[in-house]
Image (spheres, grey):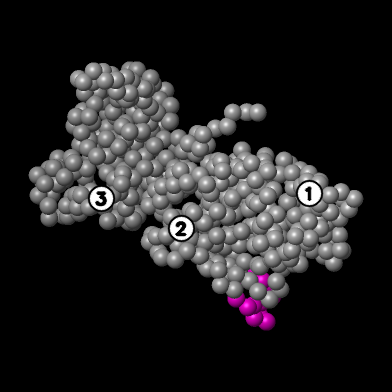
Amino acid sequence: MPEEKTSMEYVMEAASGAHFSGLRVDGLLRSSSSLSSPTSTSSPPPSSLSATITDSSKQPFVIGVSGGTASGKTTVCDLIIQQLHDHRVVLVNQDSFYRGLTAEESEHVHEYNFDHPDAFDTEQLLECVGKLKCGQSVHVPIYDFKNHRRCSESFRQVNASDVIILEGILVFHDQRVRNLMNMKIFVDTDADVRLARRIRRDTVERGRDVNSVLEQASANFNSLPIFTAVSSWYAKFVKPAFDDFVLPSKKYADVIIPRGGDNHVAVDLIVQHIHTKLGQHDLCKIYPNVYVIQSTFQIRGMHTLIRDREISKHDFVFYSDRLIRLVVEHGLGHLPFTEKQVVTPTGSVYTGVDFCKKLCGVSIVRSGESMENALRACCKGIKIGKILIHRDGDNGQQQLIYEKLPKDISERHVLLLDPVLATGNSANQAIELLIQKGVPESHIIFLNLISAPEGIHCVCKRFPALKIVTSEIDEALNDEFRVIPGLGEFGDRYFGTDD
């Protein structure tokens, strides 16, 4: 038997937000005669739908929850929903998308494997979740577990939400379904516990008497005692499906929760992670290498001051320096570290971390030079290189004019300094130069005060391994490639050369 991991070890296998009230819509609606199917909804024309799908910034956070039958998936989902009470959350069950049995299949229901991927209408599941991600409400079918058919005249309306939880034993099996998810959770529970829960669930929650539940088990094993029949049914259908389809999908999980809903530590950590993601700027959900320092009233107040065109130069420099220092400190937090023990003045041993030694800064002249003092204040004796890139007018064309970098820069982690990320062209040229000098892309951290979405797209698509740390993401670029609302020409305002 392999050693069982602790709950924290499982949770730490994870790699690596708007305010509404209410949880989910469970009301049943009657379909009118105009509805051709239980899932029909008004859809935009193809071009409009395509545009909506590509607008990832408006998409909700999708969580997939999988695991063996009766492993506690629904309990985990309910706990997550309860703790996300300040967000709009909907739960979509894969069980709602069971295919209705034909007359012939119904006659031999004891031979039908409900745990097989073919038992589900995956195409309809994809359609429903896809529409929810696009901000559309959908009609989810209602499945009658007693008669193994869909309710032809009823459905459940699910509205657009901040968080979509997709739960089911095989939601990780199909890659197309997995690709819809932002986070994947696997609930790991002992097989004996799951078997007992499944019998109880089918009798209590799904309205079937014991004989009907065990009919599948006893139909092929009439000569056996009832519990032996149950075991045989479990061995014939449930366990093989788990071994063949459910368990292999465990490798796709970001987080594995042993003991299901009883593991409150794991659920709490997951909810904290979800809260963090929901609170992030939408671009941070698209690009996991973009980090925005957590906003406070102090940070918001300093942004208000430096963006005010009437502020004095002295105050502009003072508050810009404060913000730059925060960005630099946050950027340093993304550097690698090693464990280090020291003896405190009380004679005790303190286990901490040692700073990254191979480090340098590179400023993009000239506004990037405004960030050098903060970097020197945080990193004593740090080497700083310079790159001068000339922008030819307002057409966005860039030309490298000058560079002076440490000779051993290829061995260092680089903090690239420029207070404003606008089009991203200058940044891309500077990053390309660093890579040509032998700096691994993953060793570059780009620090700035404000970023335009266009610049983030430009840099992150070209250099996905690089990190961007900023204090605020603005709305857009105007026709003159200026950041809006922005803060003007930062270098001129900081060094006092503005008109």
What numbered label is drawn on residue 1? none
> Mark 1 or mark 2, which is nearer to you?
1
- Can you see residue 283? no
Which of the two labelled residues, at mark 2 and mark 3, occupies the earlier sequence position? 2
Marks 2,3: beta carbons within 8 A: no
What numbered label is drawn on residue 296? 3
- Residue 210 lies, in percent from the top left, at 75, 60
Residue at coordinates 36% horizontally, 22% vertically from top-left?
339
Which of the two labelled residues, at mark 1 and mark 2, occupies the earlier sequence position? 2
Q: Distance between the residues labelled 2 and 3?
A: 26 Å
Residue at coordinates 29% horizontally, 55% vertically from top-left?
484
Q: Is mark 3 on a helix, strand or loop?
A: loop
What numbered label is drawn on residue 82? 2
Magenta stretch, overall SS: loop
Q: How far apart are marks 1 and 2 (CA)?
A: 37 Å
Q: Is residue 175 above or below residue 400?
A: below
> Mark 2 or mark 3, which is nearer to you?
2
Q: Quadrant of residue 208?
A: bottom right
Q: What residue type is labelled 3?
A: Thr
Q: In which quarter of the image is residue 443?
A: top left
Residue range (magenta): 29-41
- Can you see residue 206? yes
> Mark 1 or mark 3, which is nearer to you?
1
> Label 1: which residue?
227
Q: Which amino acid does label 1 sit on?
A: Phe
Give the position of the N terminus as an image quadrant.
Answer: top right
- Residue 84 lies, in percent from the top left, at 43, 56
Q: What element carries label 2?
A: helix
Taking the image as shown, residue 61 lies to the left or right of residue 455, namely right
